[in-house]
């Protein structure tokens, strides 16, 4: 009976491992075949230039995760991550978030100014149209009076 | 002989992470991943492509910090009296200060430019 449970747990673990590693391999395969497009992975959605914050966040995550995995394999158990390293990760992620906030704020202000200018132009056009309409009506009335 | 699953899973994940890093690195080198304008000033009109000093200093100090920490972490496992590691090595205070200072300079520069654009 004990052997059966051992065998069953081994099979479940093997199936889980195949699912996890299979998914990982599939993702890698799709990247290599170009079906997952990484060309804009460092580019902001509203821009054409690469983002330095994204780059450093990506690189630092690779390094910390790689070291974590390597040392975990070495020791045979998950290793602890000290506060100072979490602090470094926090600085990296925080800098990315703040940087995006500054960019969004700047483009928000720019959009507001553009919207205000558009509204002003629209109001001016409407007023001009009304004036033209009134002018035409007056001209028509004058013409009727003459005739 | 049944292979130890944990060993296979760990090696598989490590290999996957290394392959992913290689693919991303190769993409950056060959230009398949867009790196254009990463060090340039924040301009929407794309006219000013000169490197911004705050961005350059962030990149240099960041790479220095990452390499220094990776070397420190690898050295902990390769010493002659190295026992099995139970945690990642502590990052030295100087490294944290360098990292924080460099990011602060970068954010300050970005904030200043966004103010001057808004004015």
Image: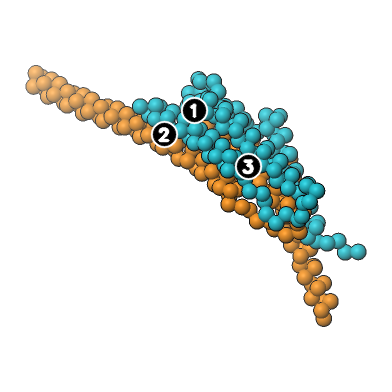
- Name the foreground residue: A74 vs B112: A74
Q: Secondary structure at mark 1?
A: loop
| Left or right: where B13 falls relative to A114 | right
> Crowdedness of circle 1 by 10 Å Cα count: few (<14), some, many (20+)?
some
Spatial CA span between label 1 and label 3: 23 Å
Please tell me the numbered disc located at residue A60: 3
In the picture, the quarter occupied by the N terminus of chain B is: bottom right
Residue identifier under label 2: A106
> What residue do we see at 80% from left, 56% from top?
B8
Spatial CA span between label 3 and label 2: 27 Å
- Among the chains pictured, the one given cyan colouring is B
Residue identifier under label 1: B42
Q: Which residue ends up furthest to the front in the rendered image?
A: B81
> What residue do we see at 73% from left, 54% from top?
B85
- Name the foreground residue: A130 vs A45: A45
| Left or right: where A31 falls relative to B103 | right
Q: x, y (%) of residue B92?
A: 61, 43
In the picture, the quarter occupied by the C terminus of chain B is: top left
Q: Secondary structure at mark 2?
A: helix
> What residue do we see at 86% from left, 61% from top?
B3
Q: x, y (%) of residue B52?
A: 53, 25
Mark positioned earlier in the residue sequence (3 or 2): 3
Figure check: A114 above or below B92: above
Please tell me the numbered disc located at residue A12: none
- What hue does chain A carry in this figure? orange
């Amino acid at each position: 009976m004990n052997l059966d449970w051992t065998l069953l747990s081994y099979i479940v673990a093997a199936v889980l491992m195949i699912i996890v590693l299979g998914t990982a391999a599939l993702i890698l395969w799709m990247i290599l075949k170009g079906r997952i497009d990484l060309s804009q992975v460092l580019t902001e959605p509203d821009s054409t230039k690469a983002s330095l914050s994204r780059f450093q966040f990506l690189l630092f995550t690779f390094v910390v995760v790689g070291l974590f995995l390597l040392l975990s394999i070495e020791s045979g158990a998950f290793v602890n991550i000290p506060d100072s390293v979490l602090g470094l990760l926090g600085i990296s992620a925080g800098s990315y978030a703040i940087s995006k906030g500054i960019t969004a704020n700047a483009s928000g202000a720019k959009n507001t100014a553009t919207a205000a200018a558009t509204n002003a132009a629209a109001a001016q056009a409407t007023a001009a149209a009304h004036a033209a309409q009134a002018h035409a009506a007056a001209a028509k009335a004058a013409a009727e009076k003459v005739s | 002989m049944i292979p130890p699953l944990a060993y296979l899973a760990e090696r598989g994940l490590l290999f996957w992470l290394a392959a992913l890093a290689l693919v991303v690195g190769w993409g950056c080198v060959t230009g398949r991943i867009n790196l254009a304008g990463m060090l340039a000033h924040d301009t929407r009109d794309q006219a000013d492509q000169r490197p911004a000093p705050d961005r350059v200093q962030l990149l240099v100090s960041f790479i220095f910090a990452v390499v220094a920490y990776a070397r420190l972490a690898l050295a902990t496992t390769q010493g002659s009296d190295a026992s099995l590691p139970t945690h990642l090595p502590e990052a030295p205070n100087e490294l944290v200060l360098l990292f924080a200072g460099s990011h602060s300079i970068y954010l300050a520069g970005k904030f200043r430019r966004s103010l001057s654009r808004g004015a």
